[in-house]
Amino acid sequence: MSNKKSHIWLWVIGWIFVFPIPVTVLMLRNNNFNKKIRLLIITVAWIIYLLFVFVGTSTKHNNSNNVQTVTDSSSSIAQNNESANLNSQSTEETSSNIGEITENVETVTSLNDDITESITENYDWLLEYQTDTCESTENVISDSEYAENIINSIVEKYNLVSDNKLSYIEDFAVQSKDSGHYRTEFRLTHFKNAVGRAYKLNGQSVDIIAAKNLIGRDTIRIYALCLSINQCTELIRYASPLIEDSISDEDINKAIDYVIEHGEASGYYYGKNLGITLFGDESKGYRLMITN
């Protein structure tokens, strides 16, 4: 608790006496802004701070000289023999101080012009950046369109490599219990914006579900009715690399061998993230699910 309080006091002291330091820390930690914007904010903060320090120091120095001038003038009244020389010296010092103030004002004016020019240049860049950002935002597709593109890509690539083709039947609302394609797991939150499409393969039903996931890999599931193990293994062979493109042929073959040997699979995982669920028999057919 004491460390936390000390950190708070450091922040308070920093904001009061040297505000560019906390500004710099916050900008370096903040990734919401473009790098150029953060550097611009840090630069302007330090320029403003140094400007205040410079002007304050000059003013203090000038006031000190003016006090000294008044003291010298008072002494000259008491010393009549040296009054003329002291008055002359005071006049010279005053003129010198006026010259210093004038020089400082010119310096500040020059700094102000530099700051204005820098802000103007960066403002033009910000306008251009904002325009580019708005244009890129207009090209962003919705989550449902993104999911549809995933399904379209899977179906298109599957039909290129398989002799048996997927033929489109209909779209369906994934979380609707009246869709005719509803499954219990569809009540989960990550299926909220999922897209579902139904297809036919070898005369049997195949449902493909896809959903965009912002915090990890996209959700993809394939549900199929198969008349035989061979139909199931065919779907596993050609669909697996379309869901996980890094999977090896060796991993796919191991999964197929497992399915053929056992005739079922309850959460069999292969590759990096793929899983198979399979149950049924040759007389009644099989239900297959492939998921990532």
Image (cartoon, rainbow, N blue to C red):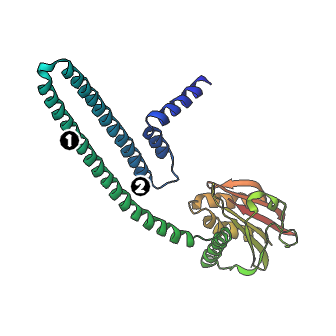
| Gap in angstroms between the C-alphas marked 1 and 2 | 39 Å
Above or below residue 120? Residue 84 is above
Quarter of the rendering containing residue 247? bottom right
* Label 2 packing within 10 angstroms: few (<14), some (14-19), many (20+): few
Front-lying residue, 287 or 82: 82
For the question of whether residue 38 can be seen, the reply is: yes
Quarter of the rendering containing residue 99? top left
The image's mark for residue 144 is none
Which residue is at a point 55% across and 26% down the rendered structure image? 6
Instruction: Report the amino acid beneath label 1.
Output: Gly
Front-lying residue, 126 or 265: 126
Which residue is at a point 75% across and 54% down the rendered structure image? 267
Point out the tag, 1 or 2, that comes first from the N-terminus: 2
Would you name the residue on which mark 2 appears? 36
Q: Is residue 19 left or right of residue 150?
A: left
Q: Quadrant of the N terminus?
A: top right
Which residue is at a point 50% across and 43% down the rendered structure image? 26
Say which element carries label 1. helix
Quarter of the rendering containing residue 201? bottom right
Which dot, 1 or 2, sits closer to the camera?
1
Residue 115: image x %, image y %?
34, 53
Above or below residue 14? Residue 251 is below
Instruction: Report the amino acid beneath label 2.
Output: Lys
* Label 1 packing within 10 angstroms: few (<14), some (14-19), many (20+): few
Residue 149: image x %, image y %?
63, 73
Say which element carries label 2. helix
Residue 106: image x %, image y %?
25, 48
Q: Is residue 134 left or right of residue 202?
A: left
Q: Is residue 150 left or right of residue 221?
A: left
Residue 167: image x %, image y %?
71, 81
Would you name the residue on which mark 1 appears? 99
Q: Quadrant of the C terminus?
A: bottom right
